Image (cartoon, grey):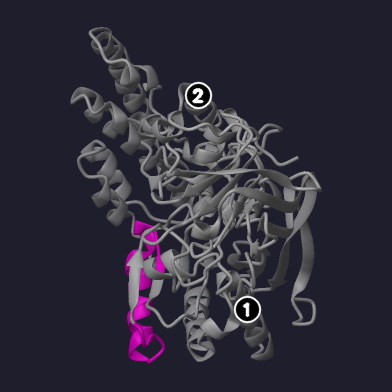
Amino acid sequence: MRDLGLSEVALEAVPVDAWRLREAFVELADDTRFECASFGGVPGTEPGGVTGELVRVGRAGRRQLDRLDVAGKVALVDWEVERLWPYHVGLELGLRGAAAMIVASPSGGPYYQAPEALGTFDGQWHSQGPPCVTIRKEDAPKLHGIVHVVLDATLTRGAEAANVVGVLPGCRDGSPSIVAGHHDGWFRAAFDDATGVAVTLELARALREAGTTPERPIVFVSHTAEEYGIADSPYDWCYGAWWQIVEEHREWSTEASFYLNVEGSGRPEPFTVDAPPELRRWARRVCRRAARDGLLPHGFAIGKPSTWTEVWPFLAGGVPGINVSTFTHDFDRTEYHTQYDTADRVDFGYLAKLTRVCADLLLEGPTEPLDFAARARELRGVLPQDALDDLASATGRDRFTAIGRGLHGLDARETAKYPHEQTARDIANLERGALDRVGLNWLCRDLSAEAFAIERARRGRNAPRACWAVQGDPDLGPDLWHELASPGPWVEESVQRHLAASRAELERRLARMEAAARGEVFHLPRPSRENRAG
């Protein structure tokens, strides 16, 4: 950034729980060794590793584990169902005394389906979980007997990483636009997200060399801790971006005019723009123009922002923003977070064209008035009509701060939803007796009462290390483990109590949403001692 001539270039410290993988493998008694990986934040084995009898536990729900003895043994887990994540299984296995855990995603599983794929992810690991490695699906069937597991990985609490920031001054001060990628990644990380960093730097280089002075300053950012940043938390990703908007640059939440997040780009797939309702019409217009100019040979799609990209904490902080990428569902299932994320998978000619599209998005910005009427249409039937009429007629950037902070919520699975949606769905399921669909209670099928209580306790806005989840105020729903495990006449009375509490919670959430729609700006929470790394 300094070489490109940007000003105010700085490394902005971000406290993280640093995790470094040096080596991971599983070895048989005949010295046959299988290369492995692991998940961010998983504790390493003792220097000599762990040796134990291999036990195949399938998907490792509690019903499967109740029939097995895993104490002191090495459990081989099949990651078959996406929603039952390895950290859930690791908690249950750790409470049952397993010495180590090996994870494979077999054919038909949610991830790592490319031939010989070796995969990883952020861990969301519980402190009660054992050391864990991942193995290729082709190697898992070869394991047998006594196995030796080595995970050489260090977890350093209270370490320091950095976001990198540089500025291209504008004609006038204040109200910057921001463009960012993230520089942390798994394996070679060429697509996810060296391409985003490359686009960010190329935009800076091209604008400087062209002598461009934008109307407003442009801040160029490379984020840290997108893939993983904090231990013992179910919200361990997008940490660097969250820290930047709630701590380092809180002023951006009310002043920044636009945020462009560049995720993995350049694979020969459609250009996807994840945009909030206020920006979809504008984003579609820019993309249509780019398609006419031959810059989008694979087409484009307009999607919705998700919590899996750094645009979400910026939106929830109050900044109008979009995320762009060429991710696809097929890539997610096959090569995502594997050793196949290499430069030869990137079409650099296409990436250059997408950089020109990003330049248009960045320089033009949402020049049209923000489309608050589109947001009002989404909330029709949810909020009072007079509040929606007020929202639909709103103008100006200031109103988005209220919308961002008051209408960006999370459901019980960290999916981006309106704040009322999880609660309303829970009420409907309580009323019809579908207790396993209420809040987090789908986990009751696979976790013991102790494991479920531990998992539930670390979630929600008041949980330790909630970080960006505080912004979205997730509703976890009531704890119904015992109601599901021991049905009887008593359950009806319990359900009625939970229904009353959920109905009151829904009223609270709808009232807060109505206030935001009318323009009330809620406080942007700072990182507390409990929800920061260290």
Q: Is residue 476 above or below residue 188?
A: above
Q: Which residue is mark 2?
A: 453
Q: Which residues are magenta?
A: 273-298
Residue 301 visible in the snapshot: yes
Q: From the viewer's perspective, tell me whether residue 88 is left or right of residue 328.
A: right
- In the image, residue 279 lies in the stretch drawn in magenta: yes
Residue 251 visible in the snapshot: no
Identify the main secondary structure in magenta: helix
Q: Earlier in the sequence, mark 2 or mark 1?
A: 1
How far across and down, in percent of the image, does residue 226 sit?
Answer: 61, 57
* Residue drawn at point x = 62 percent, y = 52 percent: 133
Considering the numbered disc 2 on the image, is that residue within a helix, a strand or a loop? helix
Which-is-in-front pick, marks 2 and 1? Answer: 2
Q: Which numbered disc covers residue 198? A: 1
Considering the numbered disc 1 on the image, is that residue within a helix, a strand or a loop? helix
What whole-number distance in Å separates the C-alpha atoms at marks 2 and 1? 44 Å
Q: Quadrant of the N terminus?
A: bottom right
Q: Is residue 438 above or below residue 36?
A: above
Q: Is residue 65 above or below residue 414?
A: above
Residue at far front of view: 30
Q: Quadrant of residue 529?
A: top right
